[in-house]
Amino acid sequence: MSRSDVSLAQEISSISAQLGQLRAQLSPSAQVLLDRCDWNFVPGAGYQGYPLMVLRFDYRVHLDDPDLLELADQIQRHRGAVDFALFSGETQTPLKVFSKTLLDRRWHWHR
């Protein structure tokens, strides 16, 4: 195995461990949501350098989904402000959402 292959394998292993640690910090219901989709966390890829959490669902996703709102709340508590790119099973174009937007919407629904 070449040095670049070893380096790439180490980087992938490190990223995988970081994602596993992030998932482990979340509630069981948030973990179930992550299990139902493909997801990734991309540092600095969001608006103004915020981290971007990419979620790819194979079904229609709703912004008022309680599990999605709980996930946004927990991610914000553990990582700070995070942007989301939500892919629905209906389209290849992501819906980009700020975690603050999700959390503000939830607050208005519970008033």
Image (cartoon, grey):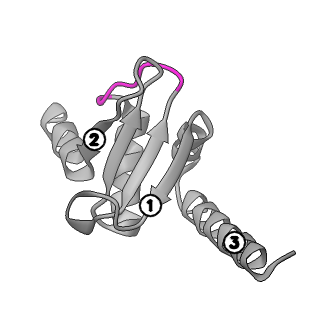
Of badges 3 and 1, nearer the viewer stands 3
Q: Which mark is residue 8?
A: 3
In x, y percent, where is residue 36?
Answer: 59, 33
Q: CA distance from mark 1 to mark 2?
A: 14 Å
Q: CA distance from mark 3 to mark 1?
A: 17 Å
Image quadrant occupied by the N terminus? bottom right
- Give neighbour class at mark 3: few <14, some 14-19, many 20+ (Cα, 10 Å): few
Residue at coordinates 59% horizontally, 69% vertically from top-left? 18
Q: Earlier in the sequence, mark 3 or mark 2?
A: 3
- Give neighbour class at mark 1: few <14, some 14-19, many 20+ (Cα, 10 Å): some
> 29 or 62: which is nearer to us?
62
- 54, above or below 110, in the image: below
Quarter-of-image position of residue 48: bottom left
The residue tagged with tag 2: helix, strand or loop?
A: strand
Residue at coordinates 54% horizontally, 24% vertically from top-left? 58
In x, y percent, where is residue 3?
Answer: 77, 82
Question: Circle 2 sits on which residue?
Answer: 96
Instruction: Give the magenta range.
Output: 58-64
> 2 or 90: which is nearer to us?
2
Of badges 3 and 2, nearer the viewer stands 3
Q: CA distance from mark 3 to mark 2?
A: 29 Å
Which amino acid, by three-letter code, is at mark 1? Val
> 34 or 50: which is nearer to us?
50
